[in-house]
Image (tube, rainbow, N blue to C red):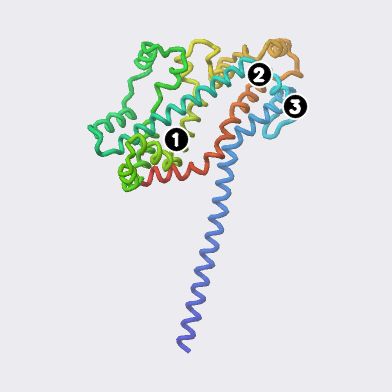
Amino acid sequence: MDNTRLALDSSLGRKKIKSKISKGSKVFDVINTIIMFLIILITLYPFIYIISISLSDSIYVRANMITFFPRGTNLDSYRQVFDTPIFWNAYLNTVIYTVVGTAINIAATCALAFCLTRRELLFRKTITFMVIATMYIGGGMVPTFMVVRDLGMYNTLWAMVVPGAISTFNMILVRTYMQGIGEEMLESARIDGANELGIFARIVVPVSKPVIATVGLFYAVGHWNNYFTPLIYLRDAERYPLQLLLMNMIVNNDMSGMGQGARDAIQAGRTNFPTSNMMIAASMVIAMVPILCVYPFIQKYFVKGIMIGSLKG
């Protein structure tokens, strides 16, 4: 009888504990869901608002009646942007800067990271210290500008892609990942007659695809959103990237790139024509599309590359 009573008491105690845990878990799940929903809403609202502005009728935009969803949907702002040659010229410049710059970034970062993983490299610790020191010590904007100018890169493509060829933080991520590659695999390749360049190209790079895709995304987004570098190093308007064109439209209220028809309509006060805010919003939406299209294909590498690159150090 005593054993049976003890068993019943123990069973009831476990049920009470499980019930308390279950209730606490449910409360936590509800609170966590609400917080995550608010974070998602705060994050997505600027995008939704910009899209709504670009799709709404100009009457509602002038009256500041757009809050969440578009009103009086029309595509006039997009048609006007598509008919603007300077916009597509800036778009093409941005694509070129992003593709060329990201390719240089990945090649230089991976090459330096691989070299710094080799213990036989002379002065490896000294070179590593000098590279890491650049995270804390910079030459400054004026000396950097003078170097770029004296090297003949001012107002050229190379001014956009060469000065920031390597990000120290991204290099450390790649180096840490490469340090986790088994030395036995590399020794086997050497026994088969492969040199260091062959090992790097045929073994290290394919194995490091997750972290390369991750830092490649970092570099690509940085180039795509960059407006400060061209503001300093580019002089000719036909070389401007899209983000600098958008900055001039937003900050300086420069609508010279919208086309004569748009400027005449705005100056005449026509209410049925897209406003400058609608033109800017449409341009921003079009500028976001490439990154939004690329990200889903790289997402599968993103978490893996970050976690492995950070934990193995």
Q: Where is residue 247 in the image (x, y as percent from the top left)?
A: 55, 19
Checking the image for residue 52, the label placed there is none
- Left or right side of 204 for 13: right
Q: How crowded is mark 1: few (under 14 residues within 10 Å), some or many (20 or more)?
A: many
Q: How crowded is mark 3: few (under 14 residues within 10 Å), some or many (20 or more)?
A: some
146 over 25 or under it: above or below: above
Q: What element carries label 1?
A: helix
- Kindly indicate whether the residue at mark 2 contacts the one at mark 3 (C-beta within 8 angstroms): no
Alpha carbon of mark 1 to alpha carbon of mark 3: how far? 39 Å
Tell me the residue that label 1 is attached to.
215
Q: Quadrant of the C terminus?
A: top left
* Marked residue nearer the N-terminal end (1 or 2): 1
Residue that label 2 marks:
276
Q: Which of marks 1 and 3 is in front?
A: 1
Q: Which numbered disc covers residue 74?
A: 3
Q: Nearer the viewer, mark 3 or mark 2?
A: 3
In which image quadrant can residue 290 be found? top right
| Upstream in sequence: badge 1 or badge 3 | 3
In the foreground, 110 or 34? 110
Residue reaching furthest to the bottom: 1
- Residue 172, x across and y down, in percent: 36, 36
Cα separation, mark 3 vs mark 2, equals 15 Å
**As shown in the figure, which amino acid type bears the numbered disc 2?**
Ser
Q: In this view, does 1 lie above or below 43?
A: below
Indicate the amino acid at tag 1.
Answer: Val
The answer, for residue 45, to whether it is visible in the render is: yes
**Disc 2, SS:** helix
Q: Nearer the viewer, residue 51 or 116?
A: 116
